Image: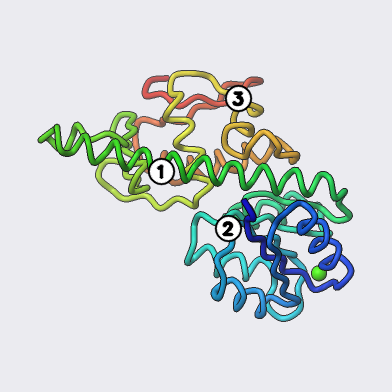
Amino acid sequence: MNEAVLVIEDEPKIARLLELELQYEGYQVGKAGSGTEGLERYVDGQWDLILLDVMLPGLSGIEVLRRIRAKDAMVPILMLTAKDSVEDKVSGLDLGANDYITKPFRIEELLARVRAALRLSAASAAARSSSSVTRVTAESSEHTAEHKTGWLTAGNLKLNEGTREVSRDGKPIELTPREFDLLVYLLQNQRQVLSRDQIVQAVWGYDYYGDTNVVDVYIRYVRKKVDNGFTPPLIHTVRGVGYVLKEQV
Ligand code: CA
């Protein structure tokens, strides 16, 4: 195993604690004490997971996150923050952070979330490679492009899990990694009413400890991109229960 974790944290005591605990758990650990150094170490290394403090001198954690995500949509990034407001969490999550850990944290909880993020990341890498295998097989046996696997559709909304393309009525739609995962889950379970808990577990992972109102925030983002300006609306609120994606009301 020996997965590599990069810790970007300017407080020496916390950085040292994380290094010792992660090494004890068998991870290889790299440390960076500023946002700039963190980006340099990120570029120079092969990392399986990044622990990123939000409050860093110079380049903020949010900016570091934005720059890493511009290059790499997949590496799991867990944000560490002293702040606990929904807005801070959402801005990080919207930029593609996988999870948030609020300081002061219990080390057992932090390690559990690191394990969960690595497990999810390994599972989705496996799913990606098996779906590309399926696609190749499908392409060689089917001659019509429309029958390729990997497409999820609802009406004129199309999503390709392999290429991560999304379009509605032929117009391309740009989604962040989390918005994409949410839309995949809704499409896979279309016409079924999904509770906020179900959505959180499926999209954020069952070890996610945050509020389920993150679901409402993300549904709003996805709706804005997928439903605004198109008919009919596909994402529907079911009062007191959750959400459903379906073509007809
Ligand atoms: Ca800090």
Label 3 crowd bin: few (<14), some (14–19), many (20+), radius 10 Å: some
Instruction: Name the residue nearer the viewer: 152 or 88.
Output: 152
Quarter-of-image position of residue 213: top right
Ligand 1 is within 8 Å of the C-beta of the residue at disc 1: no
Q: Which residue is mark 3?
A: 242
Which mark, residue 83? none
Q: Amino acid at mark 1?
A: Arg
How many numbered callouts? 3
Residue 62: percent from the left, percent from the top?
Answer: 66, 66
Answer with left or right where residue 199 lies relative to residue 16.
left
- What residue is at 37 percent from the left and 43 percent from the top? 229
Dot in front, 3 or 1: 1
Which residue occupies 12% across, 35% down? Answer: 144
Secondary structure, mark 3, is strand
**Side of 238 where 125 appears, left or right:** left
The residue that mark 1 highlights is 128
Q: CA distance from mark 3 to mark 1?
A: 28 Å
**Residue type indicated by callout 2:** Leu
| Towards the viewer: 242 or 43 | 43
Tag 1 or tag 2, which sits nearer the N-term? Answer: 2
Q: Position of residue 200 (x, y in %)?
A: 63, 34
Residue type, mark 3 in image = Gly
Residue at position x 18%, y 38% in the image: 139
Q: Earlier in the sequence, mark 3 or mark 1?
A: 1
Residue 195 spot, x, y in % from top left = 61, 24
Q: Are marks 3 and 2 in contact (CB under 8 Å)?
A: no
Q: Judge: label 2 CB < 8 Å from ligand 1.
A: no
Instruction: Using the image as rendered, state which of residue 206 and residue 108 is in the foreground.
Output: 108
Mark sitting earlier along the chain (3/2): 2
- Secondary structure of the residue carrying tag 2 is loop
